[in-house]
Image (spheres, rainbow, N blue to C red):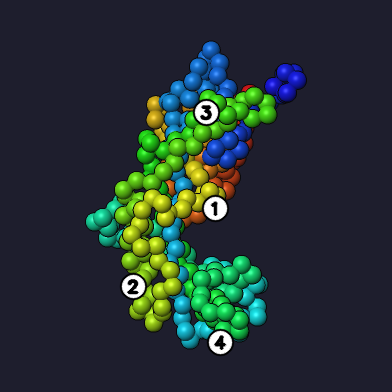
Amino acid sequence: TTPKNVVEKVEAKVLVLACNSIETPRQLLLNKTREFPNGLANGSGQVGRNLTSHFGVDVIAYFHELRNRNASKDNGTDYFHSLLTGLYWDQPSKNFSGTYQVQCGSGLRPNLVVKDVPGFGSSLKRELREKNIGHVTMGMQGSLDISPKKFLDLDPDRKDRYGLNLPRIHLHYEANDVAMAQDMVETCEEIIRAAGGEILYRPGKITVDNLGIDYNHWVGTTRMGRDPKTSVVNLSCQSHEIPNLFIGDASVFPAYPEKNPTLTNITLSWRMSDHLIEKFRKGELR
């Protein structure tokens, strides 16, 4: 409905929802009918469930031998240049499940990474320049555990300009996440010292207060699966309950590694499109 309460109707043979992992489940939950009292395609009760994202923490180091390098072209090289990955693939950790990757960034930036240095005047300027030219950031990217405690629902009090309930996010850290982040800090410190670097910043003992959730990589709220009782869409990203409803975004992820979701999201959406075309050719969708 519009603010003037005028109902607008759009007819289509197939609807593909691709609104992201927050808005897609919100739209499904908002649209309740006699046939779907818990929201569209939500007979399993899994719409909005299994929300997860990446999380991380940083360790910043300084390498004295880099302080006088030519940094004139740093603006054109972006920031993250290398990746530490493959951790705990062959031999799982005894302290946590899953794994993480470390993105390594360096370079002089307009927004200085290292700001807390002593002195004033010319010595302050020199120290800021050297520390930022010679610094390296090792930034963790781990995957939050999927849990029944992490989900999205509709906020009963907050509404948008159309009077529709806004999404309410339940996303937090658990013991497994804290243990993984602590391992990352210790591993990166060991690497920095072995390379002859000086640690400028470390978070100390990891707590939920010094971890950060990545707000760009949320997935999992309409997950795919073979069993309609435990998933929202099938392997073609087609609703188990509504044959002409498909979902084409990262909300269909059934699980999540430490990697960025973009390429997998594109691949699944492309694959869904191919399946959709084939279903039209076979006359399965009318």
Image position, residue 235 (x, y; %)? 47, 37
Q: Which residue is mark 3?
A: 154
Query: What is the spatial separation of the Cα atoms under label 1 and label 2, in whole angstroms?
Result: 32 Å
Query: What is the spatial separation of the Cα atoms under label 4 and label 1, in whole angstroms?
Result: 38 Å
Query: What is the spatial separation of the Cα atoms under label 4 and label 2, in whole angstroms?
Result: 25 Å
Mark 3: few/some/many CA within 10 Å (<14, 14-19, 20+): some
Q: Earlier in the sequence, mark 1 or mark 3?
A: 3
Image position, residue 283 (x, y; %)? 60, 26
Q: Which residue is mark 4?
A: 68
Query: What is the spatial separation of the Cα atoms under label 3 and label 4, in whole angstroms?
Result: 54 Å
Image position, residue 17 (x, y; %)? 60, 34
Q: Secondary structure at mark 2?
A: helix
Q: Residue furthest front?
A: 120
The three-letter amino acid code for the residue at tag 2 is: Glu
Q: Secondary structure at mark 1?
A: helix
Q: Which residue is mark 1?
A: 263
